[in-house]
Image: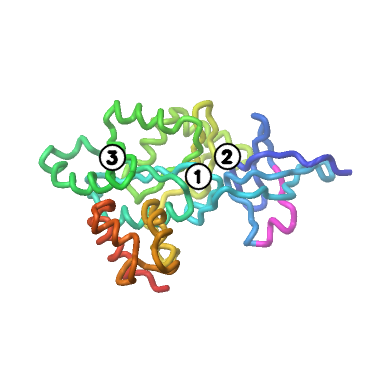
């Protein structure tokens, strides 16, 4: 006999099991057959779902509509992506930063940028990068420089009541930021894994960690984003400001290259958008195959 459907949120997935949280109680659910085998509707961490008790066992029977969905990392219903890049070790890479921004801004409403290892560069080195920082700030990006304590306090305040994940290439300090945001992070991820009898935290799966102040999705690390996950047209509408100006382009499929009456190019010419970012956009556009 089936009970009424109960709403909950997935905090971890492993094989055909989902750890869900419902009013601060946590339980392991099986997945309904269609959710196990149909890749197009497979549940992911962050999904809001409905489960029923079937034959005395909780079973996820449906996925509620998503606000957004990411392929890499495979998560849903993210408010904010924190894009992390180090200033050195590995060195600042504007091209890579623009690729990450393009991908995440295509799917998520808000991306903020955190630069790490600021203590490892001198003022002269910092000044050398100032043009990039100014271009990002003037185009509406929120920047934070860690490990400066006042910057970290500002970051924590900014993230209040949000669900977020960190992204960035290997070695930029994502784990350090996460552990400072949630001091008991390792213990919390271990707790969740124990529900699945895995016994320890693993970097091969995502975990949604809920706290009083915010929710963090701890995701597996990865070194890059394949820009061919986007089409040329998606890239042309990916950045939040490009997206806004594109609405006034003469052609809906405008790639902002040589098309007439392109609102993005007009914004560049009138210095409403950064030329530096536009030039990098053109470099990325060349690498996309479709």
Q: Which of the two labelled residues, at mark 1 and mark 2, occupies the earlier sequence position?
A: 2
Q: Please state the horizontal and vertical placement of residue 223, each as a whole percent of the image.
A: 37, 55
Q: Which of the two labelled residues, at mark 2 and mark 3, occupies the earlier sequence position?
A: 3
User: What residue span does the magenta drawing correspond to?
Assistant: 29-38
Q: Which of the two labelled residues, at mark 3 and mark 1, occupies the earlier sequence position?
A: 3
Residue where numbered disc 2 is placed: 193
User: For mark 3, does the 10 Å Cα neighbourhood hold few (<14), some (14 to 19), or many (20 or more) residues?
Assistant: many
Q: Please state the horizontal and vertical placement of residue 263, each as a whole percent of the image.
A: 34, 60
The answer to which image quadrant residue 115 occupies is: top left
Label placed on residue 202: 1
Q: Is residue 183 magenta?
A: no
Quarter holding the C terminus is: bottom left
In contact (CB < 8 Å): disc 2 and disc 3: no
Image point (74%, 53%), residue name = 32
Residue at far left of view: 124
Q: Nearer the viewer, residue 279 or 24?
A: 279
The answer to which image quadrant residue 98 occupies is: bottom left
Image point (52%, 36%), residue name = 189
């Amino acid at each position: 006999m089936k009970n009424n459907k109960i709403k909950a949120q997935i905090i971890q997935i492993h094989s055909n099991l989902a750890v869900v949280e419902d009013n601060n109680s946590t339980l392991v659910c099986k997945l309904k057959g269609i959710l196990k085998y149909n890749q197009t509707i497979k549940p992911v961490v962050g999904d809001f779902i409905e489960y029923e008790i079937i034959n005395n066992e909780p079973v996820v029977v449906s996925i509620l509509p998503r606000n957004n969905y990411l392929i890499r990392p495979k998560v849903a219903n993210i408010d904010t992506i924190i894009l992390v890049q180090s200033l050195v070790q590995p060195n600042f890479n504007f091209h890579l930063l623009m690729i990450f921004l393009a991908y995440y801004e295509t799917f998520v409403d808000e991306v903020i940028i955190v630069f790490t290892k600021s203590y490892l560069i001198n003022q002269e080195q910092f000044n050398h990068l100032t043009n990039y920082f100014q271009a990002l700030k003037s185009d509406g990006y929120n920047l934070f420089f860690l490990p400066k304590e006042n910057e970290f306090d500002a970051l924590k305040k900014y993230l209040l009541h949000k669900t977020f994940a960190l992204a960035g290439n290997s070695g930029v300090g994502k784990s350090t930021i996460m552990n400072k945001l949630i001091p008991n992070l390792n213990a919390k991820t271990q707790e969740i894994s124990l529900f699945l009898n895995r016994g320890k935290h693993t970097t091969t799966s995502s975990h949604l960690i809920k706290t009083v102040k915010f929710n963090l999705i701890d995701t597996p690390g990865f070194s890059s984003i394949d820009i061919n996950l986007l089409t040329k047209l998606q890239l042309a509408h990916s950045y939040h400001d490009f997206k806004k100006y594109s609405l006034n382009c003469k052609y809906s499929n405008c790639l902002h290259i040589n098309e007439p009456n392109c609102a993005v190019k007009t914004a560049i010419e009138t210095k409403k958008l950064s030329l530096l970012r536009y030039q990098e956009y053109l470099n990325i556009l060349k690498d996309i195959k479709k």
